[in-house]
């Protein structure tokens, strides 16, 4: 459960949840609308990643490893509870590969990489049909703001296989964060 401070009596439960609504084109996942409210913490971003992985590991929904840029903009025709969206900016391999320098406009609050089951090496051999992903929350190390990240593995039925988040991330220490950091730097 998420909490927020009310300014004096301590944390209180957040009343509005974070929701994701996927959108696709020709059966391919092209993005997700972020509804309700914006994730506030590294943990909430990692929980949002888990929900994204569950969506992406549906059979045929995501054909290859794909990078999504998080935008605080909303489509004009979106509902009143939409606060932002994740938009596919390209694949990591194969057709539609993300081109460094042309992938992002501005400095997104987060980048997400999603791997379908066919591109995921499961951490548990008894769970062969898992998808996985990573979210990178870029910091400004020169100003003392650390990079943060989260990683998740889940099955389409909702089973979470692994979930981990971390602050003070060295983007070069993990292949997913290294690719995402490279895209940010380009």
Image: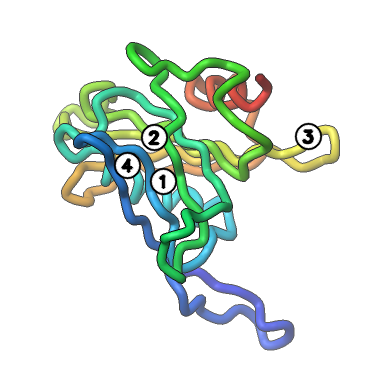
114 horizontally vs 43: left or right: left
User: Residue 50 placed where, x, y %?
Assistant: 36, 47
Residue farthest bottom in this picture: 9
Q: Which residue is mark 1?
A: 49
The local secondary structure at tag 2 comes to strand
User: Residue 102 placed where, x, y %?
Assistant: 58, 21
Q: Which residue is mark 2?
A: 133
Q: CA distance from mark 3 to mark 1?
A: 23 Å
The local secondary structure at tag 3 comes to helix
Location of the N terminus by quadrant is bottom left
Q: Which residue is mark 4?
A: 53
Location of the C terminus by quadrant is top right
For the residues bearing labels 4 and 2, Cβ distance under 8 angstroms: yes
| Badge 3 or badge 2: first in the primary sequence | 2
Mark carried by residue 130 = none
Structural crowding at the residue carrying mark 3, measured as other residues with C-alpha within 10 Å and reported as few (<14), some (14–19) or many (≥20):
few
For the residues bearing labels 1 and 4, Cβ distance under 8 angstroms: yes
| Badge 3 or badge 1: first in the primary sequence | 1
134 versus 50 height, above or below: above
Residue farthest front in this picture: 76
Q: CA distance from mark 1 to mark 4?
A: 6 Å
The local secondary structure at tag 1 comes to helix
For the residues bearing labels 1 and 2, Cβ distance under 8 angstroms: yes
Q: CA distance from mark 1 to mark 2?
A: 7 Å
Mark carried by residue 141 = 3
Q: CA distance from mark 3 to mark 2?
A: 24 Å
Q: Residue at x 32, y 42 (%)?
A: 53
The local secondary structure at tag 4 comes to helix
Q: CA distance from mark 4 to mark 3?
A: 28 Å
């Amino acid at each position: 459960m998420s909490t927020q401070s009310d300014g004096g009596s301590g944390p209180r439960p957040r009343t509005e949840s974070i929701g994701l609504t996927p959108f696709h084109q020709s059966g391919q996942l092209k993005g997700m609308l972020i509804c309700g409210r914006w994730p506030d913490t590294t943990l909430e971003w990692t929980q949002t990643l888990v929900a994204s992985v569950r969506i992406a590991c549906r059979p045929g929904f995501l054909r290859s490893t794909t990078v999504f840029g998080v935008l605080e903009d909303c489509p004009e025709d979106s509902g009143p509870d939409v606060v932002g969206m994740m938009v596919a900016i390209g694949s990591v391999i194969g057709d539609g590969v993300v081109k460094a320098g042309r992938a992002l406009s501005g400095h997104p609050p987060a980048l997400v990489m999603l791997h379908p089951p066919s591109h995921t090496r499961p951490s548990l051999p008894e769970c062969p049909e898992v998808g996985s992903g990573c979210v990178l929350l870029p910091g400004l190390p020169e100003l003392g703001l650390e990079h943060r990240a989260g990683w998740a593995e889940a099955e389409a039925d909702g089973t979470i296989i692994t979930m981990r988040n971390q602050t003070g991330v060295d983007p070069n220490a993990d292949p997913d964060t290294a690719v995402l950091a490279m895209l940010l730097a380009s």
